Image (cartoon, grey):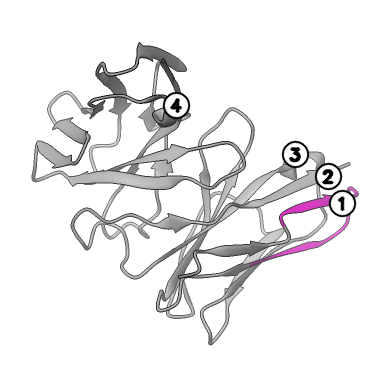
Amino acid sequence: DQQVKQNSPSLSVQEGRISILNCDYTNSMFDYFLWYKKYPAEGPTFLISISSIKDKNEDGIFTVFLNKSAKHLSLHIVPSQPGDSAVYFCAASAIGSNYKLTFGKGTLLTVNP
Amino acid sequence: DAGVTQSPTHLIKTRGQHVTLRCSPISGHKSVSWYQQVLGQGPQFIFQYYEKEERGRGNFPDRFSARQFPNYSSELNVNALLLGDSALYLCASSLYLVGLAENYGYTFGSGTRLTVV
């Protein structure tokens, strides 16, 4: 039973445009959400996070939006660059529940020059 | 500053053998966790240690065990290897447990690629 779902295995955008990566979750106990980026042969790199008391968090080119009623979050990357091409993972945690991260399957983002 | 270091980077083992994977956290980090990533999936939680105590365990069989040492480094042990244990094993370290600090996430190492034949 997948508690964190990334329904788009891949996404292709043009350089300079916005990339929107989506994530849905089913566990209502999740209260902290993170996005990671992963290049081949490297470990995941933390990008940005949001707690359930907020609906938006920005950090540089990354913005994460959280819609708790829909159990949905999205990551916006503006502007997208070819170097942003990677697999993006959405992850969630329930504070006090052994602090583990539950990951989605990932979305491969390709930014075309 | 050194990041999270894992050794070895690659490993080939035979079914039924035992394997030990090692992780050194970022200096000052007291939390270490282990994740397994199989091809096409996201990382899956195995263990969490904080201040040398096990704080969490994922849905893995008892063949999987781990420990954290006084210097906060950690080992993941897997006994009686199966073909299905072939995966990338990731170690993550952190100063805080996730969610207890704003805009903070675990820092992952590059992983150990384990192949069981």
The kind of residue tagged 1 is Lys
Q: Are the residues under badges 4 and 2 in a single subunit?
A: no
Q: Earlier in the sequence, mark 2 or mark 3?
A: 3
Q: Is residue B16 above or below residue A50?
A: below
Residue B15 counted in the magenta span: yes
Disc 3 chain ID = B
User: Helix, strand or loop at disc 4?
Assistant: loop
Is B38 in front, or is A60? Answer: A60
The answer, for residue A1, to whether it is visible in the render is no
**What's the chain of the residue with tag 1?**
B
Look at mark 3 in the image and give the residue it sits on.
B84
Marks 1,2: beta carbons within 8 A: yes
| In front: label 2 or label 3 | 2
The lab-note entry on whether marks 1 and 3 share a chain reads: yes
Report the residue at 51% width, 53% height from top.
B58
Chain containing mark 2? B
Task: Have a look at marks 1 and 2 and say if they share a chain.
Answer: yes
Direction front: furthest residue: A113
Query: Can you identify the residue that label 1 sits on?
Result: B13
Q: How dense is the environment of label 3, judged by Cα within 10 Å: few (below 14), some, or many (20 and up)?
A: few
CB atoms at circles 1 and 4 under 8 Å apart? no
Q: Which residues are magenta?
A: B9-22
Q: Residues within 10 Å of mark 4 (few under 14, many from 20)?
A: some
Q: CA distance from mark 4 to mark 2?
A: 30 Å
